[in-house]
């Protein structure tokens, strides 16, 4: 090969390298909600909820590649205590209690899911193992947001959806005092207790809870088993006639209307069950979806 041909090949290689697209940037871990989305035929509407407290069915998440990015940009690890929820802010810390054996752990929810309708929580294999769940199975659980560490995560992590405001506490001004001699004929009064002035920043720092450890420690507590009834809910209404019309569409599933709530304007919900087992409840969920009604929930009460 001539010297000119070699130089031409080298120039072409360098030009090709310059035109090559850079690898896509890896999104950084963040605090997020996200837009409404459809998963498993059911619509989900993410919202911030530090008071979430509910019972339902948890599933073991399917085997997934270690290191893949979760919905909020964190790295997935099947050997850590992680979870997936359809609507909660990400990340959040959840207390999860297995109602069938009384065991409770805490998990970091940082992904969306699970895919199967009628499930309120997906758990990593390690979290499911600590809870005593059957491999690949599902279990009745009670879940509750651990508000303090969850709020700490929301404050500490970047959030493109809601950058928020950077607040700087204004320090309190120091008050100077001077001790004067008593007036003639007056008695010395006891000296008042000296109060040390504190800055607002120090007070706020003490009030803010610390960030939860990452990964969360593998701590399980044992309580009493309290399994509940399996019910399927297919909508809530402010008018009885609308609820009855919904129940009529599900006549083959033996749906019924139940009033609930207090106050001047009661609400009405369409329900089915209770069911003898999870398989029967799942068939009812599939029947509701088959009738074209995506607002369906599988409840444990």
Image: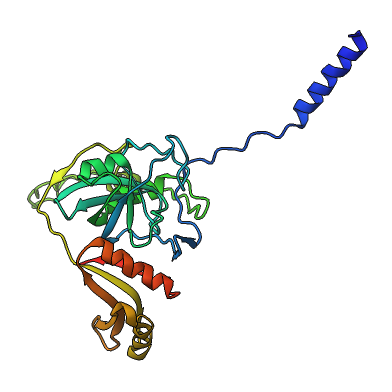
The answer to whether residue 49 of the structure is visible from this angle is yes
Name the residue rendered at 43%, 45% in the picture. Answer: 157
Query: How has the structure been colored for display?
Result: rainbow
Provide residue 134's location: percent of width, then percent of height: 23, 46
Which residue extends farthest bottom?
Answer: 241
Name the residue nearer the viewer: 256 or 155. 256
Name the residue nearer the viewer: 36 or 38. 38
Name the residue rendered at 79%, 22% in the picture. Answer: 14
Label count reads 0
Name the residue rendered at 24%, 73% in the picture. Answer: 273
Asked if 120 appears above or below 215 in the picture, the reply is: below
Name the residue rendered at 40%, 57% in the picture. Answer: 86
Asked if 169 appears above or below 217 in the picture, the reply is: below
Which quarter of the picture shows residue 63?
Answer: top left
Provide residue 61's location: percent of width, then percent of height: 36, 47
Name the residue nearer the viewer: 65 or 236. 65
Asked if 233 appears above or below 16 in the picture, the reply is: below
Which quarter of the picture shows residue 87?
Answer: bottom left
Provide residue 131's location: percent of width, then percent of height: 21, 45
Name the residue nearer the viewer: 301 or 18. 301
Does residue 286 appear left or right of residue 36 in this picture? left
Provide residue 44's location: percent of width, then percent of height: 44, 63
The answer to whether residue 171 of the structure is visible from this angle is no
Classify the position of the C terminus by image quarter.
bottom left
Which quarter of the picture shows residue 1?
Answer: top right
């Amino acid at each position: 090969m001539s010297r000119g041909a070699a130089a031409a090949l080298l120039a072409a290689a360098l030009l090709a390298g310059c035109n090559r697209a850079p690898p896509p940037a890896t999104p950084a871990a963040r605090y997020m909600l996200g837009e409404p989305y459809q998963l498993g035929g059911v619509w989900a509407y993410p919202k911030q909820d530090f008071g979430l407290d509910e019972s339902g069915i948890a599933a073991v998440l399917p085997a997934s590649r270690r290191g893949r990015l979760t919905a909020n940009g964190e790295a997935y690890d099947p050997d850590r205590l992680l979870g997936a929820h359809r609507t909660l802010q990400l990340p959040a810390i959840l207390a999860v209690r297995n109602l069938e054996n009384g065991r409770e752990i805490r998990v970091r929810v940082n992904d969306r899911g699970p895919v199967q309708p009628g499930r309120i929580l997906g758990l990593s294999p390690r979290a499911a193992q600590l809870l005593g769940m059957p491999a690949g199975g599902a279990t009745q659980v009670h879940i509750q947001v651990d508000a303090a560490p969850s709020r700490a995560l929301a404050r500490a992590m970047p959030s493109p959806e809601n950058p928020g405001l950077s607040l700087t506490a204004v320090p309190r001004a120091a008050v100077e005092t001077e001790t004067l001699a008593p007036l003639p004929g007056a008695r010395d009064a006891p000296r008042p207790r000296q109060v040390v002035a504190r800055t607002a920043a120090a007070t706020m720092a003490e009030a803010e809870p610390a960030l939860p450890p990452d990964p969360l420690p593998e701590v399980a507590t044992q309580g009493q088993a309290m399994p509940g009834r399996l019910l399927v809910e297919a909508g809530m209404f402010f008018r009885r006639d609308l609820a009855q019309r919904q129940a009529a569409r599900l006549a083959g599933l033996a749906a019924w209307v139940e009033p609930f709530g207090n106050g001047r304007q009661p609400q009405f919900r369409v329900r089915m069950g209770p069911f003898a087992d999870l398989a029967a409840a799942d068939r009812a969920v599939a029947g509701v979806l088959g009738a074209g009604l995506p607002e369906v929930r599988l409840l444990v009460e």
